[in-house]
Image (tube, rainbow, N blue to C red):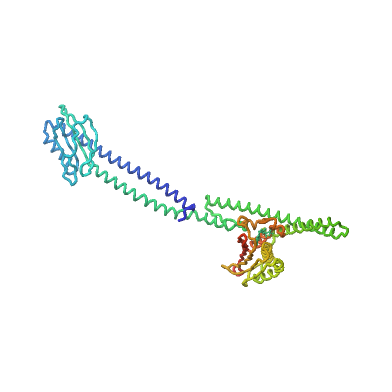
Amino acid sequence: MRLDTLRARVVTWYVGLLAAALMVFGATLYFAVQDYLKTSLRDSLVDEANAIGAKFLAYEEQKGPAWMAGEISEAYAPELSGRFIRITRRDGTVLYESSDTRDSGIDASAVSQSHFKNNVRGFRSERQAGSQELLIYADPFRSSSGTNYLIETGLSLAPIQRILSSLRSIVLIITPLILLVAAFGGQMLMKLPLQPLVALSERAGYIGTSRLGERLPVPSTHDEMERLALSLNRMIKRLEDALSQNRRFSADVSHELRTPLTIMRGELEQVLLESTLQPAVRDSVASALEEIDRMSKIVESLLAIARLDSGMDAIDPKPVDVSTLCRWVMEQLRLLADEKKITMTVQTTPMIVLIDIAHMKRVLVNLLDNAIKYTSPGGNIKLISFVLEKMAIIEVSDTGVGIPPAELPHVFDRFFRADKVRSRASGGTGLGLSIVKAICNAHGGSVTLRSEEGVGTVARIELPLAHEV
Ligand code: ADP
């Protein structure tokens, strides 16, 4: 059982509280029973002494000690009931002393003489040789003629101790059993109400940012779970609105910037045609044209990402053999690699994938272009494709500079460039990988990057195979 789940935490709390309640209940029960048994025992000893005084001792002087002993034996049968009774006159003469005939009974002769200690009534307990504990009540009695007696009645505490020990055992055995059943039952019971929560979290994980149009299932339970699903759905709706507003905004801005940039380029190109232009002015105009080209590239890339993300630019998938496409793109870029003295190899397996050729070409060009850009002369670039677990895998690996681990999680962010100076100098805008990601997502696939600084980088694309779609 995992302990870091809500179910385990609730069950642990519930079993813990139950254990505390059972402990309090067990202790209360134990002490209440103990108190009740001891009070009953004391009451019976007091009643017995009072009755002996009133019924028999009051007539001892008239009827004699033998009559009294007979009456007491008849009334209380100490030899059978295991009672201790002793009657002593003030002068120390023992008028009656019970005898216990049972096995391990009370040995009355071993019970100490209280000798009218302070002449007060009260209880004392005594331990006998066989470790038997006795509770004895001493009650001074004065007859109508003024003779003083001491009545002592006693009973063994063993039966009470036996009952209490059984009760202790029951509580100590039953409590862990109840806790075990409660823990098991709690686990089972909690499974049911938590099921909708598990379903909600799985569905919420599936929705992510690319499926914000979908909603969580709302259980019609009229409870917290239903309210949670409704609140989450409202939140997803707000996120969807904000995101699509954002995407529309970038798409609109990029679109609006396109025309003025094209006009500016045209105007500047026109200026460059002027033969009377001073060389310094010509250089400035040429540099401005370069910057306009860069801006146009950025605007085009932003527009492409925004359109792909918002679904405005619907991809047009067709069954294509990826290995042919890979070889074709590789040949397109071979010249660039040869210029940098980088060797390029391709190793592909024929496999049909539903793709938009223009977009997927762009993906491969971006990845290979990056590999060439960030690999030093003499390095190698490999393009491989294969099938793994019903997915088409395309990998572009290089022996380039690699990416520092701290920067790797950000390479798909817009405008992120690990080495800004070098990247800008090589014409990078920091949008290439964002486009790759947008296109892969639009195809229902994904892209990941593994890299080791100074060793190289591997970009991996996963796309669903045509017959799996
Ligand atoms: P850029 O246009 O700057 O290349 P990308 O979005 O294509 O932008 O890449 C983002 C950043 O990731 C780059 O600036 C670069 O630092 C890093 N990067 C991407 N591909 C590689 C690679 N193959 N080798 C090393 N670094 C890379």
Tell me the residue at 38%/46% (across/down). Answer: 22
Q: Is residue 162 left or right of residue 268?
A: left
Depicted 43 relative to depicted 256: above or below: above
Q: Quadrant of residue 269?
A: bottom right
Depicted 348 relative to depicted 373: above or below: below
Depicted 192 relative to depicted 79: above or below: below
Q: Quadrant of residue 53?
A: top left
Furthest toward the bottom, the residue is 350
Residue 444 makes an appearance in the image: no
Furthest toward the front, the residue is 378
Number of labels in the image equals 0
Q: Position of residue 440 (x, y in %)?
A: 64, 63
Depicted 168 relative to depicted 362: above or below: above
Q: Position of residue 467 (x, y in %)?
A: 60, 70
Q: Quadrant of residue 286?
A: bottom right
Residue 385 makes an appearance in the image: yes
Furthest toward the right, the residue is 276
Q: Position of residue 327 (x, y in %)?
A: 67, 71
Look at the image and tell me in which quarter the C terminus lies.
bottom right
Nearest the eye: 414 or 57 = 414
Q: Position of residue 255 (x, y in %)?
A: 74, 57
Q: Quadrant of ligand 1?
A: bottom right
